[in-house]
Image (tube, rainbow, N blue to C red):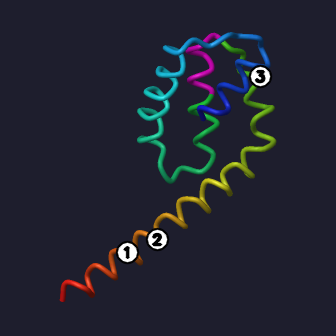
């Protein structure tokens, strides 16, 4: 969501300050905790954050075209991390017994 918001700000010619980036991180983290596992919830949370920064909601239509591809990359990253953590945990468990 953060990358999408920065993309939207660039399209609209909005200069983001350092505090804006920190706000994006905090707001994105808070909103994402309630949407885990909900399909296409990123677009809904993006809509909320766009309105907080005064950006038009029409940008969601631009993002929606590539959102599925972005979600596939995020899912692949999450699954890879889970697999690595499981392998490390299994090796540590085998070592301690």
Which residue position is annotated with label 3? 58
What residue span does the magenta drawing correspond to?
A: 47-54
- Residue at 73 percent across and 29 percent down: it is 60
- Quadrant in which the N terminus is drawn: top right
| Label disc, if present, on residue 84 of the rendered structure | 2
Residue at image coords 76%, 39%: 64
| Residue 71 x %, y % | 66, 51
The C terminus, quarter of image:
bottom left
Tag 2 and tag 1, C-beta contact below 8 Å: yes
The answer to which of 45 and 10 lies nearer the viewer is 10
* In the foreground, 61 or 77: 77
Write down the residue under mark 1.
88
Q: Depth-wise, is mark 1 or mark 3 nearer the camera?
A: 1
**Above or below: residue 45 compared with residue 18:** below
Residue 94: name its quadrant: bottom left
Q: How many marks?
A: 3
């Amino acid at each position: 969501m953060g990358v999408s918001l920065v993309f939207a700000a660039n399209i609209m010619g909005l200069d983001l300050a350092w505090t804006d980036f920190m706000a994006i991180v905090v707001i994105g983290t808070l909103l994402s905790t309630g949407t885990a596992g909900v399909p296409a919830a990123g677009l809904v949370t993006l809509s909320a954050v766009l309105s907080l920064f005064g950006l038009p909601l029409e940008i969601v239509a631009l993002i929606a075209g590539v959102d599925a591809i972005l979600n596939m990359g995020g899912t692949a990253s999450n699954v890879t991390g889970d697999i690595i953590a499981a392998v490390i945990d299994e090796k540590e468990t085998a070592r301690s017994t």
